[in-house]
Amino acid sequence: MLNFLTGDDIYNHILMMRGVDPRAAMVLEGPTDCSALDPHLNSSQIYSIPGNGKPSVLRVVELVDLNQVKWVLGVIDSDRKPLPVRSDNLVQVDAYDLDTLIFSAQSVLSRVLSVVSDPDSRRAHLASSGCDTEFDAISRLARPVSALRHVSISESIGLGLDGFPIGEVADPKTLAVSLAGLIDLAAKRAKKPPKLPYADIEAKLVAELGTMASDDRGELCGHDLHGAAALLVRTAWGSRGNWSAKAIGQMMRSTLGCAQLMGTGLFEAIRRWGERQGLTSWLCPVCC
């Protein structure tokens, strides 16, 4: 039922449930975010709830601040943008999104790859493609898609990049991505034709790629990383199964441990919020 609620609906739902569940509520952008963090939350004092996107989470926080409601925290992805509003009840993921934060957390990727791929195949591919690490190879494929995603959003083009099939425009052996093919396929997957000519979109994409920072955590969308990783696992890294982007994402979230989570800014921000509220937000200091 919560999948169809607006920010106002979620706020009212939290207040209504206070009569039977007095715990603090942490509103995240979606259910996969909840599944990633739930194992680490101190569920005796706090629970998570999916907010159905950033606008709904921000609306919940707006109402919480307006009505001075206690024990409600909103958590949003950065999506390459600064914190949109200042609130003691809002924290932002210290990466493009939560999936990117998990993907780049220490040892999470290596642990997943040890299960789904062959180490000798990975080493051979990295050597032939000129990459130092698996993350380097994955990010090389994901970067053009994430860059085009940013261009599409900033220019209001509306390209179809959700669940993008990177394998149709990339060569996993060389890690080369056809920018023209990427734009063409994204335009064909869009709900309506883009308002800009393909040449103009490609020029903006090239410019965007030239300005992307070296810190991939802030630049690359988690969905794009999952798609690139799945492609490499299936085609170049000796796959131990037909792994999809969705399956890779699920494994990443389930592999996240306390040691990795505690090294993030998100963990510390939520911990500090809990302390201000008189709560212990996480189980991690206890279980580790």
Image (cartoon, rainbow, N blue to C red):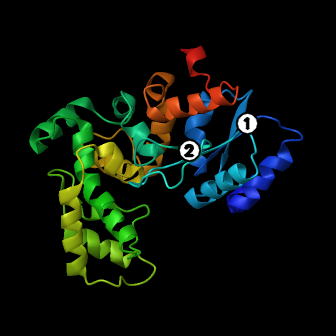
Q: Nearer the viewer, residue 238 or 36?
A: 36
Task: Tell me: 239 left or right of 244.
Answer: left
Q: Vertical placement of 157 versus 266: above or below?
A: below
Viewer-proximal residue among 13 and 182: 13
Left or right of 187 in this view: 56: right
Q: Quadrant of residue 128?
A: top left
Rendering coords of residue 231 (x, y %) = 31, 51
Q: Residue at x 18, y 66 (%)?
A: 206
The three-letter code of the residue at mark 2 reads Asp
Amino acid at pointer 1: Ala
Mark 2 surroundings within 10 Å by alpha-carbon count, few (fewer than 14), some (14 through 19), many (20 or more): many
Query: Which element type, helix, strand or loop, lies under badge 1?
Result: strand
* Residue 283, horizontal then vertical, whole percent: 62, 22
Residue 201 x, y percent position in the rendering: 25, 75
Secondary structure at badge 2 equals: helix
Disc 2 versus disc 1: distance between alpha carbons?
17 Å
Q: Is residue 230 visible?
A: no
Residue at numbered disc 2 = 33
Q: In this rendering, would 263 be left or right of 183?
A: right
Residue occupying image coordinates x 36% and y 27%: 107
From the viewer's perspective, tell me whether residue 256 is left or right of residue 135.
right
Q: Mark 1 or mark 2, which is nearer the start of the sequence?
A: 1
Where residue 63 appears, as percent x and y from the top left, is: 71, 55
Answer whether residue 287 is visible to the viewer in this image: yes
Check disc 1: other Cα within 10 Å, few if <14, some if 14-19, many if 20+. many
**Which quarter of the rendered picture does the N terminus lie within?**
bottom right
Residue beneath the point at 69% across and 49% down: 65
Which residue occupies the extreme right position in the image?
19
List the residue tagged with mark 1: 24
